[in-house]
Image (spheres, helix red, strand yellow):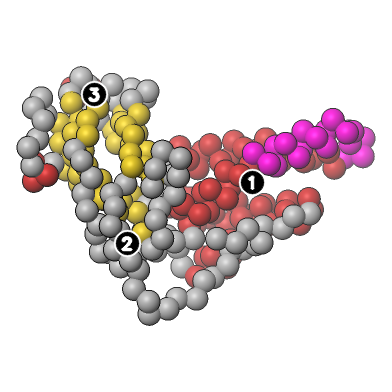
Amino acid sequence: MSKDFIPEGQELFHSWESNFMKKLDEMGAEELMPPPEYHALVKLWDDYEKKYAVAEDPTTKTSIAIHARNKARSVFEKDLRRIIKACIINNLKVTDEQRKALGLPIYKTTHTPSPVAKTFPWSEPLTNLLRHIIVEYGQSNKERSKPEGQQGVELIYVLSDVKPTSLDQLIRNESDTCTPVYLEFTEEERGCTFWYSLRWVNTRGKKGPWGPILSAIVP
């Protein structure tokens, strides 16, 4: 994905990102991405906005203030690009009109079919949040993006004391377009073993092979 749509100059970038964040909120950002992802982005945005204001005010503009603004922008812009790539550019819930309003490019569609994945997603279950399992996924541990043409993943799972011997036993289902997948459990389910498997789903709904059955303990 080209980075050219994000302006380089400070004033142009500030104007662009202010519009982007405003429109994203109006569109219902928490419907397009996991709420924790959006909340983390907003915190970085707030930090950048404060430091931008200090660096632009003639009474507080110093080399230290400018350095702080540039550092805050770098962190904010990095996460902003990741969110755009993972949750918006290829999200079928986002229309071309909304992409245009956000200041994003509209890519021409062709009749070339999206490839069906030949591999399964890499994944890692995180259990540092009480009553939650957060499943991060990607092409590999070092590449958290989706393969070309893939809309997201399908995740199937079950809570069981015994390891399932068949994918058919993973009776619960989740779909996700932006890593990670957030799963919430009840107090009674704490301590249970969570068994799951993932596969890629392309932009036309075609599905790749299932990965292995992996597990974690509900914290």
Residue 33 in sight in this render:
no
Q: Position of residue 22 (x, y in %)?
A: 60, 53
* Region in magenta: 57-75
Q: Earlier in the sequence, mark 3 or mark 1?
A: 1
Q: Nearer the viewer, residue 67 or 39?
A: 67
* Badge 1 element: helix
* Badge 3 element: strand
Q: Quadrant of the C terminus?
A: top left
Q: CA distance from mark 2 to mark 3?
A: 30 Å
Name which residue type carries label 3: Ile
Q: Earlier in the sequence, mark 2 or mark 1?
A: 1
Q: Residues within 10 Å of mark 1 (few under 14, many from 20)?
A: some
Residue at the disc numbered 3: 217
Q: Earlier in the sequence, mark 2 or mark 3?
A: 2
Farthest bottom residue? 111
Q: Residues within 10 Å of mark 2 (few under 14, many from 20)?
A: many
Residue at the disc numbered 2: 202
Q: CA distance from mark 2 to mark 1?
A: 27 Å
Q: Residue at x 33, y 42 (%)?
A: 122
Residue 77: which disc? 1
Asked which quadrant contains residue 213, the reply is: top left
Name which residue type carries label 1: Glu
Residue 186 on the magenta segment:
no
